[in-house]
Image (tube, rainbow, N blue to C red):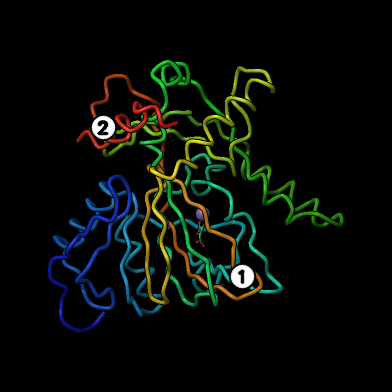
């Protein structure tokens, strides 16, 4: 990186619960540890943060992402050979969206799901192509106390479900699928996790990758999961962003889920993506005290009886 060092960022809240803009930062320039640490705490507080007008190189994006932790490689997305941490998400007439238009947290089919995702817009479609995020702390806190109690301690199996279509076809494809299944045997994750840093409780099942609740019949699992999945669809828990080329977003997959709105086909949309590897997901801890009571608003809202 060259040029004048960045000053302190300005963080502008965009929503009661989720989403903030970080202003006054040019990621092509050096970033002091103090400025990075302000950005990091904004991420934990707002769950998803965005920067406008970051016309940076791919390498600069990767370098910024590394500040958040070691990067992971994505087994299902095209990668640049010389830069295997980079995923290119390019949709157009011949490459329809695969699976980002379902509510999810990233790669929960891994034993250690993705921690943070750093996504930058290269090209916007003629119209549409927004992304939405849902606050999964609010999703948990907005459930009735009875249901919160019931799901505490439950676990769910996860699977790379929708990506299985990539392996339809001949013998070779089936062999590849077998290899992927061996690489990603269905992990079991707590249905409610305690965020390791903020100590918030988070609903951690998602429509894209959760397979079933353990210790319950198929019928029970399917129906209860449906209730839990619907929490991500509550508009008051959501933040929706319209991209511009150069918009860069960072989100914490342990605090929110996302959904790429698929309303622009066949127009092209192009993103570059890097992700930070995760580690163990602590289960619900009854003694955990949220660092701040971020979720109060969500609880009050639910108790108004709107849902
Ligand atoms: C992702 C993803 C959303 C988008 O990068 O993990 O789901 O808007 N992308 O492209
Ligand atoms: Mn995703």
Q: Secondary structure at mark 2?
A: helix
> Mark 1: few, some, or many residues within 10 Å (few <14, many ≥20)?
some
In this rendering, position of residue 5 left or right of residue 189: left
| Image quarter of the C terminus | top left
150 is higher (above) or lower (below) than 262? above
Residues under numbered marks 2 and 1 in contact, where contact means CB atoms less than 8 Å apart: no
The percent position of residue 14, horizontal first and vertical second, equals 28, 56
Dot label at residue 285: none
In this rendering, position of residue 8 left or right of residue 254: left
Farthest bottom residue in view: 3
Q: Quadrant of residue 3?
A: bottom left
Cα distance between the residues tagged 2 and 1: 39 Å
User: On the image, numbered disc 2 is attached to which residue?
Assistant: 296
Disc on the earlier residue, 2 or 1: 1
The percent position of residue 303, horizontal first and vertical second, equals 34, 26
202 is higher (above) or lower (below) than 44? above
> Mark 2: few, some, or many residues within 10 Å (few <14, many ≥20)?
few
Number of residue marks: 2
Image point (22%, 71%), residue name: 25
Q: Nearer the viewer, residue 186 or 41?
A: 41
User: On the image, numbered disc 1 is attached to which residue?
Assistant: 91
User: Does the beta carbon at disc 2 come under 8 Å from ligand 2?
Assistant: no
Q: Secondary structure at mark 1?
A: strand
Image point (50%, 21%), residue name: 154
213 is higher (above) or lower (below) than 112? above
Image point (52%, 46%), residue name: 104
Q: Quadrant of residue 221?
A: top right
């Amino acid at each position: 990186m060259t040029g004048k060092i960045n000053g302190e960022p300005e963080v502008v809240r965009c929503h009661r619960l989720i989403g903030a803009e970080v202003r006054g930062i040019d990621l092509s320039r050096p970033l002091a540890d103090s400025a990075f640490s302000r950005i990091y705490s904004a991420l934990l507080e707002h769950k998803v943060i965005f920067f406008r007008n970051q016309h940076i190189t791919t390498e600069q994006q990767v370098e910024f992402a590394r500040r958040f932790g070691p990067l992971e490689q994505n087994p299902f997305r095209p990668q640049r050979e010389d830069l295997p941490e980079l995923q290119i998400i390019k949709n157009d007439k011949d490459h329809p969206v695969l699976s980002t238009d379902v509510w999810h947290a990233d790669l929960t089919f891994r034993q250690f799901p993705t921690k943070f995702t750093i996504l930058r817009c290269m090209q916007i479609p003629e119209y549409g192509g927004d992304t939405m995020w849902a606050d999964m702390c609010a999703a948990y806190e907005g459930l009735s106390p009875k249901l919160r109690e019931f799901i505490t301690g439950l676990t769910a199996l996860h699977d790379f479900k929708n990506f299985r279509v990539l392996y339809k076809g001949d013998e070779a494809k089936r062999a590849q699928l077998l290899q992927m299944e061996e690489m990603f045997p269905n992990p079991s994750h707590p249905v409610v996790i305690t965020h390791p840093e903020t100590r918030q409780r988070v609903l951690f099942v998602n429509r894209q990758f959760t397979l079933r609740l353990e210790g319950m019949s198929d019928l029970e699992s399917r129906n209860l999961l449906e209730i839990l999945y619907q929490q991500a669809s509550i508009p008051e828990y959501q933040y929706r962003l319209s991209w511009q080329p150069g918009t860069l977003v960072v989100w914490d997959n342990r605090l929110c889920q996302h959904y790429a709105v698929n309303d622009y086909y066949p127009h092209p949309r192009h993103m570059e993506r890097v992700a930070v590897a995760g580690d163990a997901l602590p289960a619900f801890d009854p003694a955990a005290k949220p660092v701040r009571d971020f979720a109060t608003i969500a609880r009050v809202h639910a108790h108004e009886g709107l849902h």
